[in-house]
Image (cartoon, grey):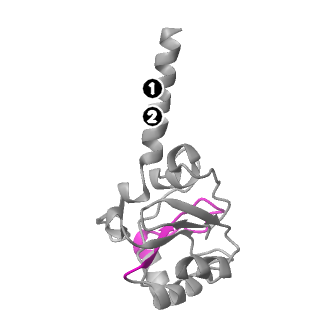
Amino acid sequence: MKNLMMMLALTLSFLTFAQDKSFHDYKVEGIDGNTVDLAQFKGKKLLVVNTASKCGLTPQYEDLQMLYKEFGGEKFEIIGFPANNFLNQEPGSNEEIVEFCQANYGVTFPMMAKISVKGEDMHPVYRWLTEKAQNGVMDSEVKWNFQKYLIDEEGRLVDMVPPREKPNSDKILNWIKG
């Protein structure tokens, strides 16, 4: 019984520790190969989105860039995470992704190196975004390219927005302005 109580206490303390971790506690690789400390985004609302260049939803890059142009800067950022998890729709290298995004959509918001957003090789940032045990808010599954996560100024998960909902939806605009 004593061992069971001790294991329960350890498990609870681990879960509390995991939920205390914020988005800002991670470091990721930028699309240029340099390390990006997500702590640099403290004090800003963040729209985190997994992207792909050969998807029916790829035109959302245009909406994302327009949103970034209007609101990006001191209080709001968009962070793109290219991923090739859905029907090989992001097969390119980081260099090819940058070239595609700039040539076709004029993307200027921060893009990270290509990662996995689901499965056994899921990136730790996406584990945090999708597991309530880590983010303390909700479980979610990345259903497709261009799924969006709303992160508050303190690095806490606020909500998830489905892939087909456009970046300039009322839900997202009201959250940015609120």
Vertical side of 128 occupied by 1: above or below: above
**Tag 2: residue type?**
Phe
Residue ID at (53%, 86%): 67
Tell me the SS state at disc 2: helix
Tell me the SS state at disc 1: helix
Q: Are marks 2 and 1 in contact (CB under 8 Å)?
A: yes
Which residue has dot 1 on it? Answer: 10
Residue ID at (64%, 61%): 86
| CA–CA distance in space, label 2 to label 1 | 6 Å
| Total tally of numbered discs in the picture | 2
- The range drawn in magenta is 74-96
Quadrant where the image shows the N terminus: top right
Residue 108, image x and y in percent? 42, 84
Side of 44 relative to 178 (left or right):
left
Asked if residue 106 can be seen in this view, the reply is: no
Task: Reply yes or no: does residue 40 show up in magenta.
Answer: no
Which residue has dot 2 on it? Answer: 14
Residue ID at (53%, 63%): 83
Residue 73, image x and y in percent? 39, 83
Q: Looking at this view, is 123 or 175 the one in front?
A: 175
Residue 170, image x and y in percent? 67, 82
